[in-house]
Image (cartoon, rainbow, N blue to C red):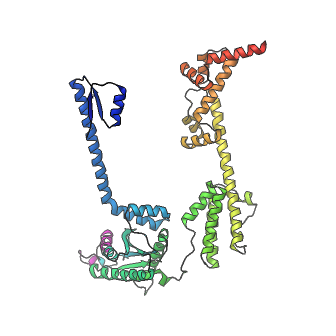
Amino acid sequence: VKIVLLTGYDEFDYAQRAIRVGVDEYLLKPFSADNLTRMLAKIRDKIEAEVAEREDVRQLKEHYRTSLPLLRATFLASLLTRKLSRSAIEEKARNYDLRLSGSGYAIAVITPHQQEGGGETASEHSLRGSGDLDLKLFAVLNIAAEIWEQQNLGSAFIHQDKIVLMTVFADSGMEGWTRQAQDALETVLRSIDHYLKLPVTIGAGSVVTALSDVKYSFEDAMLALDYRLVPGTERLIYIHDVERRPAEKLRFDELQEQALIRCLKVGTDEELRETVDAIFGELTRTAAAYGDLQVYLLEVVTAVLKTAKDADVDMDALFGAGFQLYAEIFRFSGLSEAQRWFNELCLRILQHIASRRQHTYKDIVEKAVAYTKEHYNDPDISIQRVCSHLHISTGYFSGLFKKEVKMTFVHYVMHIRMEKAKELLRTTELKAFEIADRVGFADPNYFSFCFKKQVGVSPKDYRSRIGAAEGERGE
């Protein structure tokens, strides 16, 4: 619905109130037929535009609805390949309406066997004899997904030419759910054999307690698949059957590594201490063997060394010639001593990187200031030209310059020009338009406007005041 007001009142207050109550058009009497026609055409165009926009939104929602299965599969696949934060996972799960809340998680991976010699003689209607891997995966997914959904175990999807079964254990009775998942995997294997006559192997990973650790269960499942080449191995392989490992593996994961690297590069001393506390808190919390602790610390120290190398930190200059970082971590008698040493190591690297960065900042700003003082009289000087000269982006330079100089680059150029203009007004007899040209203004009127705005008086009055003040001092 559109409201058009045809009125003989021409008071401004009346028009304002009409707009406030939602009037779309306001036509003042008397008006011609052409005016009314143009106004109605404008209303028609507005209605058509709104209808088209609503249609676009509906189409977008429909496209989103039809794309939801693919979006879900893409998100679930991302859990297998990289470590995601808990908040990011929860947000995506809500958006895609996925049930991912539970007390434990496990991944199983199904892979069809490669076609062996002689497979080409199989019937053309035989899935086993088919060379179409996508068709095999689709057929296996149909069976596996149906069983998984019937038993409310989790999700099934295709990833890296394999079928992935993600089990989400309920918040209670994980042991019972584990048995149910194992029974379901055996059912999947039997159903594929019975209905598809297609040889497959299933690798089952370890159970993890955090959804962000699902990638480790996937890695275990893929590792379990490698054992299918071992003679006598079953076609359903659990990683805990073929490899003995602690119940909870000590891992320096990518989120911890990213947090440490970020602190070393751009963090504060306090942020670094908190990150180091979290890293060593993991060591204290996990009852790992001494050898596992050493491997964990080696991974952490390697991340520090890589960061230092990327930042071009000279470790010999910082810690002394012959400093052997890897040897240092094995000389401590306890974790608290190792943590103090590691914190001091990281703190010195952080401060060194920060000092280098600050020196770089100042160097950039000093070069920009020098360039500006040399070219302030060029009407075409701009932040783009300065950044091109310094080979940096305008966005980065703008923030850096304002932080160091306490004013924007545009204000700084104006400040330099005004100071030079005042100097010329004091020391020369040049006219205002000549001074405008010398300080980089192509338009003398604009120069006078800017001068009065910055200094408070016109160039002429400024010169008069300076002359009067000097005359008084002369008397």
Q: Residue at x 34, y 81 (%)?
A: 189
Front residue of this view, candidates 17 and 78 = 17
Front residue of this view, candidates 374 and 56 = 56
In the image, is 125 to the left or to the right of 209? left
Residue 422 image point, x, y percent: 66, 22
**Residue 229 visible from this viewpoint:** no
Q: Residue at x 59, y 32 (%)?
A: 411
Residue 452, placed above or below residue 246: above
Front residue of this view, candidates 323 and 47 = 47
Q: Residue furthest left?
A: 33
Residue 76, placed above or below residue 6: below
**Which stretch is magenta?**
120-142
Residue 239 image point, x, y percent: 47, 80
Q: Residue furthest bottom?
A: 232
Which quarter of the picture shows residue 277?
bottom right
Q: Residue at x 70, y 70 (%)?
A: 338
Q: Residue furthest top?
A: 475
Where, quadrant-wise, is the C terminus in this rendering? top right
Residue 172 image point, x, y percent: 44, 78
In the image, is 74 to the left or to the right of 48? right
In the image, is 139 to the left or to the right of 248? left
